[in-house]
């Protein structure tokens, strides 16, 4: 039974599928913090949050079973993603479900800002009838500068155009074609900042975007500019905004997000030009249902080992590619596991070479799987998420390459590892209708199904060697399912790969190693 812990309020309809799932036990603890949260996380397989729960490195450290942290929303800045990655925990979000709501909220703020609606409301309900203090400006023919033309920025641009605004956008990934398709003028950051009657930010909060709008950028803006932030607190330097409003440079600001949330008695609230909402961008029935449905689906997929799509700490793999890679995944993992048990010494380099049909695909996910297979022999808790991180942390160089030489196979994957004392390699293929096969170990061609218990023996090619091994196994009641032999030259170095039905007892390993022809014997568990 998977244990799912929910620590922020999530839409009831959204989590319905979790409540209905027979293999899931849901604990709903909105607002859980401190010791209670630390204790609850210990037994959870999945944690579902919105933006209130702070998923810190310390909390993640306590989570011994956690497989997935799911954010019902876009921004994952309340989650220590690197700490989760280190621990092999997948972090997923729901990037699409609240786009429209947040774009609509930004548009509502835009109109409210232009027409002083919150200030006028406060005045009217306090008994005043003051029309001259609340004269606004039209949106028609004004320039809206959008910084960050992603999902929300794009939806906002469409709405602004419907209001006959000129839309100028800066986004490092904005192509000329996309700008033309959306109908916005592509600009540099400086051009966008200088052009806007209204400037709105829709980027994530990153090292680059923290205080993107600061004292200097305010000085480049038009006098009387109006500023909006419905993305993340911290993109705008709040102190610089305060000064820019005080000086008259900025005519007004609409803020849904703050550097610290909740902001408490913020100096900006003493300025009548500032309107604010308490991080309401995604707070609609529709958005909350959408994001909860999306992340609950992802959580179920991850817990059940099924494909999922919105991991923020894993590269996303299009469904079509996932389907094409699926048959190779098992082979990849088995090759990784095989070679890690054969090679001795501290790993320094892993080279994966792809050829034939598999080389026509984007193979990075397969390399990740091989890495997982290699590392899981020596390390516990290795998975697809943390395998590259663990390799890097240990100074293991990972090289991925493609060649045209398939050695006669339709496709081939070769894994070579270099350790402090050894260089070993294994290659494998998929045989149409027959599954995975190991086709070469070091320089020896073989045909081995990578499955179950294998014994890899290096020996001298001498008459009777194979028979003596067989007899010893038989005398210990060990059945040999398949046997493969290979040699470099008559009387030279040779190998045997036996597939046996149960592991070798220690006493038998010792007896086998005493045979004069045997140079080394390794048991391999696949
Ligand atoms: N107020 C609220 O309740 C909500 C806020 N958000 C926030 O809104 C923001 C945007 O969300 P989405 O549009 O879904 O994200 P998105 O990922 O679709 O778009 C972000 C865009 O910002 C661009 N960008 C990144 N760095 C930039 C820079 N230095 N200058 C200009 N552009 C830059 C990216 O290229 C991308 O196109 C995020 O911070 C998200 O957390 C999202 C939903 C609700
Ligand atoms: O959970 C919420 O309402 C906040 C949404 C948000 O800020 C996001 O999705 O990035």
Image (cartoon, rainbow, N blue to C red):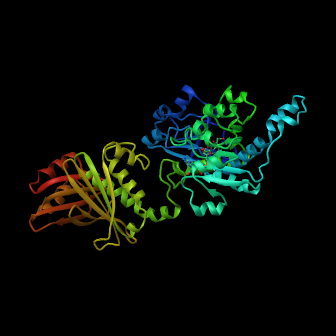
Q: Position of residue 95 (x, y in %)?
A: 60, 50
Residue 460 in the image: above or below residue 59: below
Q: Residue furthest bottom?
A: 408
Which residue occupies 65% across, 29% down?
Answer: 263
Of the 4 image quadrants, the one containing the C terminus is: bottom left
Could you say where residue 131 lies in the image, as x and y percent from the top left? 88, 36
Residue 245 drawn at (x, y percent):
69, 34
Q: Left or right: 47 with respect to 330?
A: right
Please report the residue visible at 71 percent of the width from the left and 41 percent of the height from the top.
224
- Looking at the picture, does residue 372 appear above or below residue 51? below
Q: Quadrant of residue 127?
A: top right
Q: Is residue 91 above or below residue 482?
A: above
Q: Horizontal placement of 35 versus 20: left or right?
A: left
Q: Nearer the viewer, residue 416 or 134?
A: 134
State the image coordinates of residue 336 (x, y, percent, origin top left).
33, 55
Image quadrant where residue 362 sits: bottom left
Q: How many marks?
A: 0
Residue found 31% across the figure and 64% down from its top: 428
Quadrant (top left, top right, bottom left, bottom right) of the N terminus: top right
Left or right: residue 364 versus residue 130 is left
Please tell me which residue lies in front, 157 or 340: 157
């Amino acid at each position: 039974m998977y244990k799912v812990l929910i620590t922020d309020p999530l839409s009831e309809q959204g989590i319905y599928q979790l409540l209905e799932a027979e293999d899931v036990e849901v604990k709903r603890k909105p607002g859980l913090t401190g010791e209670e949260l630390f204790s609850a996380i210990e037994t959870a397989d999945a944690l579902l949050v919105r933006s209130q729960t702070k998923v810190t490195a310390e909390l993640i450290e306590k989570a011994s079973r956690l497989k997935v942290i799911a954010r019902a929303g876009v921004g994952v800045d309340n989650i220590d993603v690197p700490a989760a990655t280190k621990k092999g925990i997948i972090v997923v979000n729901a990037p699409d479900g609240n786009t429209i709501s947040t774009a609509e909220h930004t548009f509502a703020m835009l109109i409210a800002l232009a027409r002083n609606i919150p200030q006028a409301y406060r005045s009217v309900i306090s008994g005043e009838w003051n029309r001259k203090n609340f004269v606004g400006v039209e949106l028609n023919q004004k320039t809206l500068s959008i910084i960050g033309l992603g999902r929300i920025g794009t939806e906002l641009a469409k709405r602004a155009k419907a209001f006959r605004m000129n839309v100028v956008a800066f986004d490092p990934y904005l192509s000329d074609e996309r700008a033309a398709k959306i109908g916005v003028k592509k600009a540099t950051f400086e051009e966008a900042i200088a052009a806007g009657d209204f400037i709105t930010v829709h980027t994530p909060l990153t090292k680059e975007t923290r205080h993107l709008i600061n004292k200097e950028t305010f000085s480049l803006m038009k006098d009387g500019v109006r500023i909006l932030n419905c993305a993340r607190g911290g993109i705008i330097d709040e102190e610089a905004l305060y000064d820019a409003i005080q000086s008259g440079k900025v005519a007004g600001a609409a803020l849904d997000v703050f550097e610290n949330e909740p902001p408490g008695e913020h100096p900006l609230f003493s300025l009548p030009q500032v309107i604010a909402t308490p991080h309401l961008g995604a707070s609609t029935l529709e958005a909350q249902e959408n994001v909860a449905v999306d992340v609950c689906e992802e959580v179920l997929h991850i817990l059940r080992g099924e494909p999922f799509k919105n991991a923020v700490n894993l590269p996303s793999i299009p469904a079509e590619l996932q389907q094409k890679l699926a048959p190779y995944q098992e082979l990849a993992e088995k090759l990784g596991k095989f070679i890690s048990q054969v090679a001795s010494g501290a790993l320094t380099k892993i080279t994966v070479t792809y050829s034939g049909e598999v080389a026509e695909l984007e193979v990075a996910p397969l390399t990740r799987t091989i890495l997982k297979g290699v590392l899981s022999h020596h390390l516990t808790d290795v998975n697809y998420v943390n395998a590259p991180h663990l390799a890097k942390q240990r100074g293991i160089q990972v090289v991925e390459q493609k060649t045209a030489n398939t050695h006669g196979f339709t496709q081939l994957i070769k894994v070579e590892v270099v350790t402090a004392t050894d260089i070993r390699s294994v290659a494998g293929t998929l045989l149409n209708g027959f599954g995975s096969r190991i086709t070469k170990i070091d320089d020896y061609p073989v045909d081995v199904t990578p499955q179950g218990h294998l014994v890899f023996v290096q020996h001298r090619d001498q008459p009777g060697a194979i028979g003596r091994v067989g007899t010893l196994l038989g005398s210990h009641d060990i059945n040999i399912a398949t046997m493969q032999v290979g040699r470099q030259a008559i009387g030279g170095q040779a190998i045997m790969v036996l597939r046996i039905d149960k592991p070798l007892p220690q006493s038998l390993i010792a007896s086998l190693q005493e045979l004069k022809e045997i140079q080394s014997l390794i048991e391999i568990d696949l």
